[in-house]
Image: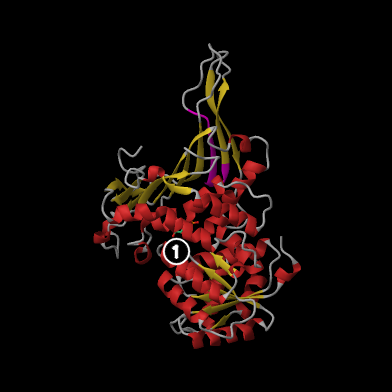
Amino acid sequence: MTSPADRDDVALIILGATGDLTSRLLLPGLAGALAAHDLPRVTLVGSSHSEHSTDEWRSIVREGLAGAALDEDEVEDLVARAAWHTADATDADDLRALFETAREAAGPDAAPVLYFALGPGITREAVGALAGLEDLPDGLRLALEKPFGEDEESARELNAVLADVVEEDRVFRVDHFLGESMVTALLGLRTANRLLGRVWGGRDVERVDVVVDETIALEGRAEFYDGTGALKDMVQSHLLQVLAMAALEPPERLRPQELHDAVVEVLRATRVWQDDPVAASRRARYTAGEVDGERIPAYAEEEGVDPGLRTETLAEVTLAVDTERWRGVPFRLRSGKALGRKRWEVALTLRAPEDVPEGLSPAEGRDRIVVGLDPREVRIELAVDGADTPFDAERRTLAADLGEEQVDAYGEVLRGILTGQTLLSVRGDAAEECWRILAPVLAAWEAEEVPLDEYPAGSAGPAGWG
Ligand SMILES: O=P(O)(O)OC[C@H]1O[C@@H](O)[C@H](O)[C@@H](O)[C@@H]1O
């Protein structure tokens, strides 16, 4: 998909470069992507408000890139080119000087990419400062982390400012779940064979469950997570993107505009089930327990947490997708932390079979198609006629284990950014829709109309949730 024009050198300028995101996700992802693909030459330019030196930045880069698939020479090459510039990202003059440093380090022809590894408030201010710059570098691309805004209105405002800075096809709203190979594989599963696409819709599917249960707890992220919670952290962004990939009408061509149009169309048709956010949502948070043999304190007692914020660590919302294909089929989206078992999947439960001949005893339960996002697998739980007694169906599972992915999700998303392809990023109108869909739930929770349940860390969730 990479055209020669996309092979230009890139100056990847990371704002907030000394933060956790850069070392834990961006640099390892970049190493994986560079090792697996023929990508443009990258010069890493680090920046943050706090004073650091090029040497310090180079050791962050070395550490972040090492250990992945890149060989040592390539790592050292990237380290040697890496440059540092201390700057206040919200100050136009500082940004101008930062672009100059990037130009010197990467050369005048390198395409500048400004990656905002910053919180939402400061990102908004920095974008505002950019909008005030008259002499923006040619070909500038912007990459923004979630959350994109804080509600529909602020997302719309941010989109408007971004539109003043660069064209939409140079804005990369990062949702790393779009780089998960099984999320994009959802589309292939439906279209690249004659079998699954036939049952992919409400005629045959009774319900869809999109589940991202994590075993990890807060892991010291109180500053980010407390007051955000599972609904905004996971459902509002990642899970709605997964829903869109599972439910959209396949576009004719796999090009950014066609795919993004299809995503927006299905998100526009999505709303809270029966327009009743109280009945269609549940929330809970973990109390003390044990996960994989490790003792986990109650969320409210984790360091840095303000129990008064009533942050949920498990969120569940049922949505309706009002398209011809899916009308009347509930989509349950659920994600939580400190649960007993990791489960990342999209599961389609099929309707009961029709026309079963009298005398054939059908199997218990329902057929299901389960797409495992991590680990990567496809499972089909199917009633088959058992070997023991003729005409006596039993449930069996056909499973395809798809093995480890070559490049991690961040690597895939970065690959798109480095080559200027927006296919795996979120378009502005889609980001607004995601806030619109969940606004009634956020309001009901804010008004305390939905109880905040509890579950012990390491359990399957609150008793009675099923
Ligand atoms: O396991 P991954 O790929 O990092 O994705 C899950 C993470 O995704 C992030 O976006 C969330 O902020 C985290 O809370 C979550 O744990």
- How many labels, in total? 1
The N terminus lies in quadrant? bottom right
- Whether label 1 lies within 8 Å of ligand 1 gets the answer no
Q: What colouring does the structure picture have?
A: secondary structure
Residue at the extreme top of the image, as rendered: 359
* Type of secondary structure dominating the magenta stretch: strand
Residue at figure coordinates x 26%, y 63% from the top left: 306
What amino acid is labelled 1 in the image?
Pro
Residue at figure coordinates x 54%, y 19% from the top left: 393
* Nearest to the observer: residue 66 or residue 151: 151
Asked if residue 260 lies left or right of residue 310, the reply is right
Residue under label 1: 147
Residue at figure coordinates x 66%, y 63% from the top left: 35
Q: Position of residue 386 (x, y in %)?
A: 56, 19
Relative to 133, residue 430 above or below:
above
Asked if residue 280 lies left or right of residue 146, the reply is left
